Amino acid sequence: MSDILVVKLGGTTIAEQRQVLEEVARVSRRRPVVLVHGGGKRISEWLERLGVPTRFEGGLRVTDAASLEVAAAVLRGVVNSELVAGLRDLGVDAVGLSGVDGGMLVAERIEGMGLVARVVDLRRDLLDSLLVSGQVPVVAPLARDEGGLVCNVNADDATAGIAAGLGVRQTVFMTDVDGVRGADRQRLATIGSAEAEELIAAGVITGGMIPKVRAAIAAAVGTGSESAIVDGSAPDALVRAIEDPTFGTRIVGRSAGASAGA
């Protein structure tokens, strides 16, 4: 497995991300890091300001042409630039890009969701060249669909596509909760795909946690790989996500012959 670390951040303001960016800066001096970010909250704020209606299905934003313009502007123009600037202030040679650049994220449209696509493959050349040169790619979740249209991509799905395509050993999903909750509302130390789908069907895992859990499972594609869903606001969150198996909720990769619920 690759020692590249893939980290997914939310898209809140740079002030709220400062602690995590400082951790990313420290870790990036020891191992290669790819940073993927969302921006859902800030997209919603901009859509509301502009009077553009929005709705969600299964934790994903249904995206028409008007809301895509806003999403692309916020993700690539605002959030991505802020994160790159913040990392560079910390001495990190960060480079901003989206899944459209170099055709990096290969995606297909999700039926009934408008201009929303899922990642089906990764063209890793651009990421490899940046990582080899010691730079930290900061990726906005946009991609072209099979017809060449730019589409919104769920940031967790983009993270999973990059992690699986690079064959990484560790993927960290930073969020605003301490992990995945079970039916008893207690944090689950580990979760597999079968249990996750049961909890989704039962209405225990809901909203934005649905794509996050599915993405974390998809990112841990082989024996020796691991995903972690953790509270990004906790002290030393990134280091603990990498080193402390009791922190957050873990999804451990399995061989092809292992049980889907393992």
Image: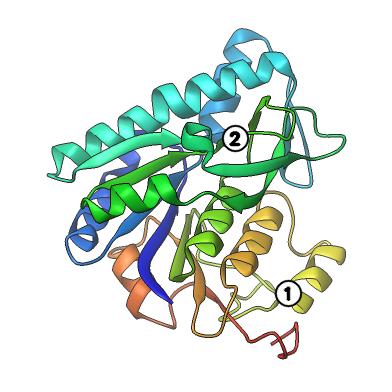
On-image quarter of the N terminus: bottom left
Residue drawn where x is 41% and y is 30% of the image = 79
| Residue 134 seen in the figure | yes
Image mark for residue 81: none
**Residue beneath disc 1:** 193
Residue 195 lies, in percent from the top left, at 76, 78
Instruction: Report helix, strand or loop for mark 1.
Output: helix
Residue 209 lies, in percent from the top left, at 66, 56
Find the distance from the CA under tag 2 to the CA under tag 1: 26 Å
Residue drawn where x is 53% and y is 60% of the image = 165
Please give left or right for residue 141 compared with residue 15 in the image.
right
Residue 84 lies, in percent from the top left, at 28, 35
Q: Is residue 256 above or below residue 125?
A: below
Q: Residue 147: which quarter of the image? A: top right
Q: Residue 78: which quarter of the image? A: top left
Image mark for residue 143: 2
Residue drawn where x is 73% and y is 74% of the image = 193
Q: Badge 1: few (under 14), some or many (20 or more) residues near its Cα, within 10 Å?
A: some
Reading the chain from its start, which is encountered first: label 2 or label 1? 2
Q: Badge 2: few (under 14), some or many (20 or more) residues near its Cα, within 10 Å?
A: many
Which residue is farthest left?
91
On-image quarter of the C terminus: bottom right
